[in-house]
Image (cartoon, rainbow, N blue to C red):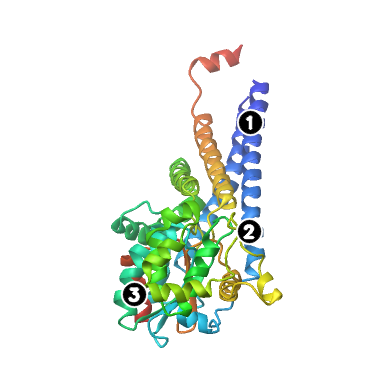
Amino acid sequence: MTILVSSNNNQRKYWLLAGRIALGIIFLVAAYAKVKPQAGMPWSAGAIKTSLLMFAMQVDSYQLLSSGAVAFVAQTLPFVELILGIWLITGIFVRGSTLITSLLLGGFFAVMVRTYALALEINCGCFGPGEHLGVKTLMRDGALLSLSIAMTVLAFMRKRASRPLPEAQPALEAR
Amino acid sequence: MRNAGRSGDRQTGILAAAAMAILCVGLMAPLALRAQTAAHHDTGKSVPATDEMASKSFGSKSAPITMEVFSDFECPSCRMLYEQTLRPMIQDYVASGKVYLVHRDFPLPMHKYSYEAARWADAAAKTGHYADVEQALFDNQAAWSADGSMQKYVQGGLSEADFRKVAKLMEGCELSAAGVKPASGSTAQAGHGCAMDASIEHDLALGKAIPVEATPTLRFTYKGRPYNTQGFVSWQLLKQFFDQLLTQ
């Protein structure tokens, strides 16, 4: 029985590893796309600031936040994505990183569904400028959210499976 | 116990495989689309100037920033952009010579009367009254977009003499009762029809080359480099963006 539980747990471990690395890379790409210099400009503090302002315009086009909140989100979100991407890949406190990822992606998805329902014709802003928010964007973000939720469930299942068995269990096993 | 273990294996496998499959489908569709559209992306070359462009523009051509607005007169976000962003911008950064604003017609097929509205605006542009008609059309968007009755609002935005000139240019431009616009290029090929369509088709072709996927789409050109964004942008934020560009 110990072998079976261990094999089951190992399989979860590998799926979880693959899933969180995929999510981690996606978050790193998203962060990079938001801060990278636009229009072929060389890397500089000014070029990054321009990119963040372009991202702020995309956040503003959702018509959801006040101007102060737009500036805050635009300046912090790319760095939150960067940290989350690294956190997911390192595998430290996996339940925490997958749960936060699911909450964040759930938030993004809800905002995108609202925007689509309101028929606002805007850029998604997910992976830099130039990506129109449409059905395909919703499909992609829905897929990412599904993956993230699955990874969160796996992370919590793994934790539960690795808990020590209750005292009555060895007695049953002995029979 | 063994069954429970196998069932757990299966559950884990199914859960992870389903998530991966959804991810693959979700990722591949937009990536395929992006690859397709990337081939049509422009290289940032400056847009050729036309007479129509000059009559639908505001400010000095020598301004450091050129801003092209691909807009549809029936689109609510375009109205918001015009009312809340472009008006203060024209009074401030366009007037002070920092920005050259160019209006581009991009009537969307989903909007029944937007092509006709673009014709009225372009006819007014030919008489030097583009700004008046643009304002009249956006200010009364909710009213005329319900039944296509834009003519009275255009008339209200112009003097009687100017309206007569615009109305004369609009002769032969009437759309069918259903507001159906001509197929792209059909009037030019026929050698007759509405004189304004060439300008609209020119703007549509420019927009498709970017590519413009929705309205409003804003295209900024600074030091030969193009920056595109889509959707409503507040004037406060746009001003910050211009100031940042001008420091580079």
Q: Position of residue B187 (x, y in %)?
A: 66, 72
Q: Note whether B241 is above or below A139 in the view shown.
A: below
Reading the chain from its start, which is encountered first: label 3 or label 2?
Answer: 2
Instruction: Return the chain for callout 1.
Output: B
Q: Note whether B154 is above or below A146 in the view shown.
A: below
| Residue at position x 60%, y 48% in the image | A18
Amino acid type at circle 2 is Leu
Helix, strand or loop at label 2? It is helix
| Front in this rendered view, residue A13 or B200 | B200
| Residue at position x 38%, y 71% in the image | B158
Which residue position holds label 1?
B11
Asked if marks 1 and 3 touch (Cβ < 8 Å), the reply is no
Disc 1 or disc 2, which is closer to the eye? 2
Q: Position of residue A142 (x, y in %)?
A: 55, 45
Hey, which residue is sitting farthest top in the picture? Answer: A175
| Front in this rendered view, residue B100 or A125 | B100
Disc 3 or disc 2, which is closer to the eye? 3
Which residue position holds label 3?
B90
Helix, strand or loop at label 1? It is helix
Which residue position holds label 2?
B31
Residue A70: which quarter of the image? bottom left
Q: Is residue B54 visible?
A: yes
| Residue at position x 32%, y 77% in the image | B93
Instruction: Return the chain for callout 2.
Output: B
Q: Note whether B150 is above or below B122 in the view shown.
A: above
Amino acid type at circle 3 is Ile
Q: Position of residue B120 (x, y in %)?
A: 49, 69
Helix, strand or loop at label 3? It is helix
